[in-house]
Image (cartoon, rainbow, N blue to C red):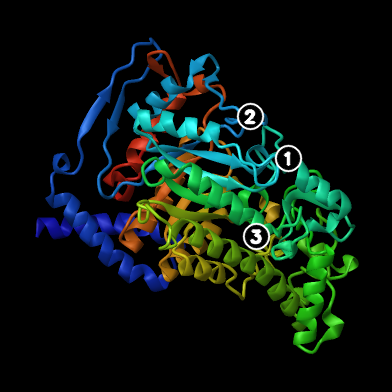
Amino acid sequence: MRLILLCQQKLIRNLRWFYFLGRRTCLVCLLLLSCSICWRLVVPANDRVSEIRYQTASKDAIPMNVLNYSSFGVPVYVMMPLSSVTVSGDLVENYDGYDLQWILKQWKKNGVYGLMVDVWFGVVEKTPKQYRWEPYIQLCKHLRQAGLKLQTVMSFHRCGGNVGDRCYIPLPQWVLDAAANNSDIFFKDQEGNVDPEYISWGVDMEPVIAGRSAIQIYSDFLASFRDNLREFLGDVIVQVQIGLGPAGELRYPSYQLNRWTFCGVGEFQCYDRYLLSRLEQAAKEVEHPDWAHPPYPYDVGNYNSRPEQTLFFKEDGGIWNTQYGDFFLRWYSKEMIEHADRILQVANDVFFNDKIPDSNWKGKVRLAIKIAGVHWNFRSKSHASELTAGYYNTRFRDGYTPIFQILKKYDTTAVFTCTEMRDKNQPQDCNCSPEDLVGLIVRASIATNVSFAGENAVSFYDADSYRQISLVARSYSVVRGIPMEAMTYLRWPEPITIFMGDNFITPLGQKFFEFVRVMGTDDAISHVIPVF
């Protein structure tokens, strides 16, 4: 009886977990939660985890308790600096006076499971079909020695021009040369501005870039990566994230920082001749040739318009909620989702084809893609900013499940950003709701049985953000019955002394490593919200 009463008390406290999971799932959630809590009460803590202690020596140092991962833990990865491999193709071996191998040992010692690194298209393939993998091979050797895992991001986009970018790595010169003769290989907005961040999926199947299509370029790149880093696949490399758009995210470049300011609606990016041709064909197929055009500029405003300032996005009577609006938005989103389908089909064949000799990494390496956290204007009816980014998600329509169905098809992990954000910290006039958006993504992941991993959208060091990520992880684990696949922290602090130095951990580092400890053990589905 005492055990039952304890469980009831804990269930009442845990009702707050389900704020974003929807009423329909609450009964299932509570049943799973009761089982989890009873297990925690019956099984001694010492049987669930083992403890080691990292002693520090500085007068400002804070002793660390670091716990090994239990079967319920969420492994935490740390993103390396964007320029950890330089434009010239060299691995950076020293950070702020600290040797790379020493830093790796500190991450490992304090419970970090692995790192994430960008594998830059513009660094690796400076000449068509000639690849420089040496810095990434060297990094894998260092990680193997340190006992760390690696998430690799196939970064087919430009570095520079997005939030948090501290480097400039353009696309390969031979791609830019092709664009000099044919600017339509890049996305264009309604003013004709060209965005050279990422190759338009209008040329996915068009052999117009040095004799190859975009899909052929990506396929050759992935195959070379597989062949040259084969010995590390499944051993060191445990995730291959495929960059599907600007900033490595599956989206259109609808809010470039050189034209857009938060929290404008952004602009549609389908004015290259290849996408316009596909739009024309789609209009013919539905017997509406008069729909063979994107929304008119005077209807959609500009990058920095608010929804109510436009005829297209306004709440009531907006064109988005008409037959033409539905046709265009379906087509616009479908083009993006088909791009994901094409590349994931290629990636799946490159890494998991049964004919690949000695491919013992099967079951040990996950494919992944990243979905953008476009949370501004989320509480408006039209969800204008999501629409221009390619997510046909409105108050009346679920725009994310079609993406998750593609991920399910290829057994691919969904990586989602902004897990650290809270509604109360957003501008009141921007209709933001990162919490509701995360909840929507979590529900789509669970409904389609797609593995889910998280990232934070912007750098932070505050306790509230750590707690928010922990809350998301716990809610997901309780409802799904298994933990999130991973949490990747953005980013390795620069300088590294923000977190640690010789024989000491700073107070900010203490907060982070306590977060790692909580996420990496069964505390990640605990009934106690941690205080960092």
Q: Which residue bears the numbered disc 3?
A: 215
Quadrant of residue 510 in the image?
top left
Element marked by disc 3: helix
Question: In the drawing, does residue 369 fall left or right of residue 529?
Answer: right
Task: Say which of 429 and 468 sits in front.
Answer: 468
Task: Name the residue: 32% across, 65% down.
Answer: 29
The amino acid type, in three-letter code, at marker 3 is Ile
Q: Which residue bears the numbered disc 2?
A: 86
The amino acid type, in three-letter code, at marker 1 is Pro
Q: Residue 418 got which mark?
A: none
Q: Position of residue 377 (x, y in %)?
A: 68, 59
Q: Which residue bears the numbered disc 1?
A: 170
Q: Earlier in the sequence, mark 3 or mark 2?
A: 2
Residue most toward the bottom? 287
Q: Earlier in the sequence, mark 1 or mark 3?
A: 1
Task: Say which of 137 and 467 sits in front.
Answer: 137
Circle 1 crowding by C-alpha within 10 Å: few under 14, some 14–19, many from 20: many
- Could you tell me which quadrant the C terminus lies in? top left
Q: Position of residue 305 (x, y in %)?
A: 81, 57
Task: Name the residue: 85% across, 74% down.
Answer: 293
Whether 73 is drawn above or below 413: the answer is above
**Cα–Cα gap, marks 3 and 2:** 26 Å
Circle 2 crowding by C-alpha within 10 Å: few under 14, some 14–19, many from 20: some
Q: Position of residue 236 (x, y in %)?
A: 39, 40
Task: Name the residue: 35% across, 62% down.
Answer: 480
**Cα–Cα gap, marks 2 and 1:** 12 Å
Quadrant of residue 119 in the image?
top right
**Cα–Cα gap, marks 1 and 3:** 19 Å
Circle 3 crowding by C-alpha within 10 Å: few under 14, some 14–19, many from 20: some
Q: Earlier in the sequence, mark 2 or mark 1?
A: 2
